Image (spheres, rainbow, N blue to C red):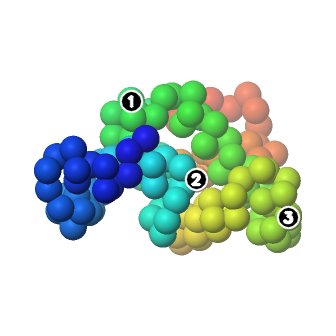
């Protein structure tokens, strides 16, 4: 994986230009897979959190795959991890305990909890879909369908 400095060198431009371009792409919800974003280095939001946020906003798997360059299996894994974090949080586990139980980084746990708070407040059908099975909803109910 390349770092921003590598991209600047390869594209014969400045690091500031690369940072500005990446920021603009991020605003368009396009993730540039640099070492910092893929390996969760630095102050940026992790790629896992970005994938979950797109999912909570209602994007379909294929759209998320195109925007983030992650596979459907990876997206499912991230959603599963997010679900576990929320379940443990609702059972009054601390973020440190959640980190230990899920093997996620502390940064990812905190970002997932922040996403949960945001989307719980504004309401999200996807959040309800994720949480209903965790709350003991009927497993035979069809998700998103009417009966």
If the image is split into quadrants, where does the N terminus sit? top left
Front one among 141 and 122: 122
Whether 144 is drawn above or below 35: the answer is above
Q: Residue 144: x, y in percent?
A: 53, 36
If the image is split into quadrants, where does the C terminus sit? top right
Per the model, the C-alpha gap separating discs 1 and 3 is: 33 Å
Return the residue at label 2: 127
Which element type, helix, strand or loop, lies under badge 2?
A: helix
Viewer-side label of 1, 3? 3
Return the residue at label 1: 62
Return the residue at label 3: 97
Whether 106 is drawn above or below 30: the answer is below
Front one among 138 and 76: 76
N-terminal label among 1 and 3: 1
Q: Is residue 91 left or right of residue 133?
A: right
Front one among 82 and 136: 82
N-terminal label among 1 and 2: 1
N-terminal label among 2 and 3: 3
Is residue 40 in view from this perspective?
yes
Q: Residue at x 26, y 57 (%)?
A: 22
Instruction: Check disc 1: other Cα within 10 Å, few if <14, some if 14-19, many if 20+.
Output: few
């Amino acid at each position: 994986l390349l770092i921003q400095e590598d991209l600047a060198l390869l594209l014969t431009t400045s690091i500031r230009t690369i940072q500005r371009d990446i920021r603009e792409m991020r605003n368009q919800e396009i993730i540039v897979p640099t070492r910092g974003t893929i390996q969760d280095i630095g102050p940026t939001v992790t790629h896992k959190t970005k994938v979950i946020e797109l999912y909570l906003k209602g994007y379909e798997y294929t759209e998320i795959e195109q925007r983030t360059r992650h596979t459907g299996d990876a997206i499912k894994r991230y959603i599963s991890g997010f679900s576990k974090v929320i379940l443990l949080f609702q059972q009054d586990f601390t973020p440190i305990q959640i980190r230990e139980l899920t093997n996620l980084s502390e940064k990812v746990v905190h970002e997932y909890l922040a996403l949960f708070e945001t989307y719980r407040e504004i309401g999200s059908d996807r959040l309800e879909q994720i949480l209903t099975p965790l709350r003991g909803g009927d497993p035979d109910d069809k998700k998103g369908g009417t009966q």
